[in-house]
Image: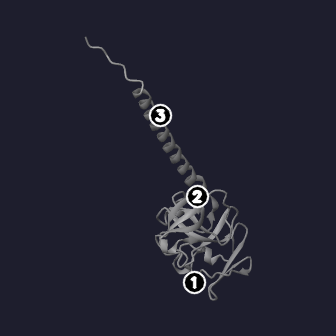
Amino acid sequence: MNRDIPPSSAQKPAEEGLVFNLYYWLQTLVLAVVAIVLLFTFVGRITRVEGDSMLNTLHDRDLLLLQSAFYTPKAGDIVVLNKTTDETLSLLGGEAIVKRVIATEGQTVSIDYAASTVYVDGQPLDEPYVWEEMDFRSGPYSGQLPFVVPEGCVFVMGDNRNNSTDSRHELLGPVDTGYILGRAVCILFPFSDIGLL
């Protein structure tokens, strides 16, 4: 006569403990993934520099950490612009572009190409980060200088002024602050360049 032998009392708690542990670790993993997604969506992001428009401050393929939350653009900040959300920005290719904020809404920008100097509200900018002296750039925003930055926009330029499609160019012009993903805080890679910006 076959009878089912009930599991021993020691075996039952062991199985319950295994299920509890598995549930605990699965719950922890899901919470960690959600926290990482929220962190990189609302607080900060990581992005890669594409191209040489920010030489010598940033180099092609540098990996950047961005501050996204509670950020208001100000002059001198290095920002990353989302090019996929606007038709004119998407013409520039890639997913994001990195530029330096030169002026914010209501400020007046003028450029003296002969002296290679940018003026904001009549004051020359001290720009030790600029790669080389500027050549004249033709384009609607170069031709309309001095230029008053519209409300809700910023005027951006690359540090490598002669190799930068920026607010002087008709494809970009002044950029709506809604297209700013965040401010570049530091270089994460390559390790030889790691540091705060």
Residue marked by disc 1: 136
Q: Amino acid at mark 3?
A: Phe
Q: CA distance from mark 1 to mark 2?
A: 36 Å
Front position in the image: 145 or 60: 60
Does any portion of residue 59 appear in the rendered image? no
Front position in the image: 123 or 113: 123
Q: Amino acid at mark 2?
A: Gly
Q: Nearer the viewer, mark 3 or mark 2?
A: 3
Task: Categorize mark 1 by other alpha carbons within 10 Å: few (<14), some (14-19), many (20+).
Answer: some
| Rendered position, 90 above or below 193 | above
- Could you tell whether 1 is left or right of 46 in the image? left
Label 2 secondary element: strand
Q: Nearer the viewer, mark 1 or mark 2?
A: 2
Q: Quadrant of the N terminus?
A: top left
Residue marked by disc 2: 44
- Could you tell whether 12 is left or right of 85 in the image? left
Q: Amino acid at mark 1?
A: Phe
Q: Quadrant of the C terminus?
A: bottom right
